[in-house]
Amino acid sequence: MNRRQFLASGVAVGGGFLGDRTLRAARRHLGLWRAPAPPRASTVTRDPDVSAQVASVDGASVSLSVAATASRDPFRVVVVRRTYPEGSVLGRARSDVVRDTTGVDPDAGGIDLDVDVPFDGTEGERDPWFYEVYARPGPDGERRAYLCESAPYVRLTDGRVERAPRVAAPGQPFDDDGFDRRRDGNDYALSYRWRGLDGDTWTVDYRVRRSTHEAAVDADRGYVKTYEESLSSPIAADLLAHLDATASPTTGTDESRPDAGEDTDGGHGLDDAHDLDDAHDTDGGHDLDDAHDVGLASLSPGRRFEAVVNFVQGITYAHDARTTDAYDYHRTVEETLVAGVGDCKDRTYLLGGLLTAGFDCETALLFQSGHVLLGVHPRDVPDLPYAYEAVTIGDDEWVPIEPSLHVPVGRYPSQPFLAVYGGGEWRYHDPDAMVRGADRVVGTFYDYVA
């Protein structure tokens, strides 16, 4: 039995053990051998001066309310019908030119537009779809700018349309000073607050569209699939751009966030961690030209790298059994951001996407018993303000990065590595160590079902 067969067989057996008793379910939730699909999500420029909302949908007619806070060059409103939640284009139409937005005050209700998006017969009965609304052209020479989206709808046999059920709701956010989520139309408005190892507190705001989140919830998932998709995630790249441009620092230790030495991973063995030097460089030299400079782009490459790691480490840790209806669930980048919570898998996927977007890193999944963390090739780690070491696993060297603990780069739980996946292949596995580590997985599962 070769390496791929060994791992695939283990996953199929594990899927049945965990209650997913069909091969399809095992593939959907664990998916170790599936090739990654093209990225589902996309990001577009938002117009800071023009807003819109879908007032009503009547058959193929979409009624919109458009408002502006400043004078704007003439533009058209473009309405796109897409399958829900996947996002394939079914049709599009545009309004007449909106020539004068001066004085179109949002408080006065804006201007009303009706746009007809004819059905072309490709929409099946009860197949849901939704509308996206854009301004074309967008500001500053952009081809278009996103304005809003509608709820999902279905078309009935008599031609009428009605609301379709949504794929999922994100659940109530955890009670956490470091995360806030609110609904703003069909956006999730998200706020994050985290502490760096140097004691500075950072904040950033971000938005995820409901359709983007729900497409992610509806997709297949698994260690390889979710990880590979995170590396090319446009949402991760867009979030990194927001962190670079808008993350705001405040100097001083934030007592409400975990200390660097606190075990926040649910028991992944910080006390036995591979401890580098705890004397972390906190000389205040975080390379901000000014204490009030905004954005991670104002930091040196090493501090920027560390700040991205700290952002992910600042997300609340919780086991899947506490936050989902599953013993083992793989959150996509979008799901982790909207939930504001994740376990080791979820945080590793998010960190992989951010570091790939920001540093073009070669990364890998490093598996331990009941745990996974991120490995980064040593050549891709910029100069950090403290010493760290790479580990050799099989034929490769990796710098371990623990996204589930508030610890420096290079520090990780001192358990044996069972397997490594990176670069599109399984680069290492240790069957004997897998067997030795099975007791912990079995015990955890027993605690879940007992």
Image (spheres, rainbow, N blue to C red):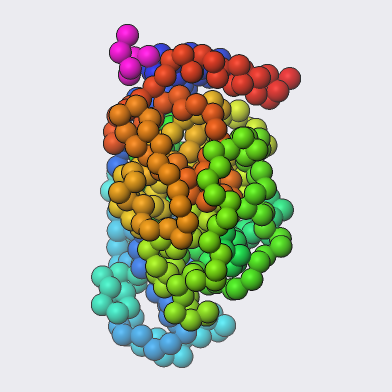
**As rendered, which of 69 and 65 lies closer to the eye?**
69
Q: Is residue 371 magenta?
A: no
Q: Is residue 173 placed above or below 217 in the rendered structure?
A: below
Q: Which residues are magenta?
A: 1-6
Residue at position x 33%, y 17% in the image:
3
Residue 259 percent across, percent down from the top left: 66, 54
Residue at position x 66%, y 35% in the image:
267
Residue 276 percent across, percent down from the top left: 52, 45
Q: Is residue 2 magenta?
A: yes
Residue at position x 47%, y 45% in the image:
410
- The answer to which image quadrant residue 443 occupies is top right
Magenta stretch, main secondary structure, is helix
Residue 423 percent across, percent down from the top left: 29, 36
Q: Is residue 215 visible?
A: no
**As rendered, which of 332 and 294 lies closer to the eye?**
294
Residue 390 percent across, percent down from the top left: 40, 41
- In this rendering, would 220 be left or right of 362? right
Quadrant where the N terminus is found in the figure: top left
**As rendered, which of 395 and 348 lies closer to the eye?**
395
Quadrant where the C terminus is found in the figure: top right
Q: Is residue 148 placed above or below 50 in the rendered structure?
A: above
**As rendered, which of 74 and 450 lies closer to the eye?**
450
- The answer to which image quadrant residue 272 occupies is top right
Q: Is residue 306 placed above or below 164 in the rendered structure?
A: below
Q: Is residue 32 visible?
A: yes
Query: Which residue appears farthest toward the top when viewing the image?
Result: 1
- In this rendering, would 100 be left or right of 407? left
